[in-house]
Image (cartoon, rainbow, N blue to C red):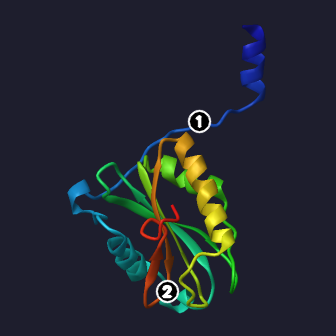
Amino acid sequence: METLARFTETFQVAEIDLIYKTGFNVTERPKITQAADAYELLLKNWNQGRLGFVEEFKILLLNQGNFVLGEYQVSQGGVSATAVDIRLIFAAALKANASGLILAHNHPSGQLYPSDADRSVTRRICEAAALFQINVLDHLIITSRSFYSFAQGGDL
């Protein structure tokens, strides 16, 4: 007991408080029922000046009913790639208490088909999500004119 008292006097310990505050009723949020819903929402919120300029990776965080809890920008890269830190994806997902994720990134080149790197990062994210019992519902590649859905293309 004396050792614990000395430890407490010597070191300050940060308190961790897990809360999620929102000013919206769940029924007022957008509901994703198909890939086109996610594309429209993402495109509306995407900075149009960067869509064809640099690659960015974002996620939509969804509750059990597929209502959108929020959007999170995971990374911004260069002309042809962006680094995706999987830990940041799940930090956001766990903080929001998300049940589902929709992954999205743009291809400034306008190319809609996934690269080997796109498939690899998607697979790694899906594997990590399974550990947390979070469903990866889709991964969209976005351009200003159209999108590619991993789920619809059979790549998920």
Question: Element at badge 1?
Answer: loop
Residue 102 quadrant: bottom left
The residue sitting at 28% across, 66% down in the picture is 30
Q: Earlier in the sequence, mark 2 or mark 1?
A: 1
* Dot 2 alpha-carbon crowd within 10 angstroms: few under 14, some 14 to 19, many 20 or more: many
Residue at numbered disc 1: 15
Of 88 and 156, nearer the camera is 156
Relative height, residue 152 to residue 20 (above, below)? below
Q: Residue furthest left?
A: 27
Amino acid on which disc 2 is placed:
Thr
Q: Residue 143 carries which label?
A: 2
Where residue 41 appears, x then y in whole percent?
A: 36, 75
Q: Residue furthest top?
A: 1
Relative height, residue 96 to residue 37 (above, below)? above
Q: Can residue 25 be seen in this view?
A: no
The residue sitting at 42% across, 76% down in the picture is 42
Residue 88 quadrant: bottom right
The residue sitting at 78% across, 27% down in the picture is 10
Of 47 and 152, nearer the camera is 152
Amino acid on which disc 1 is placed:
Glu
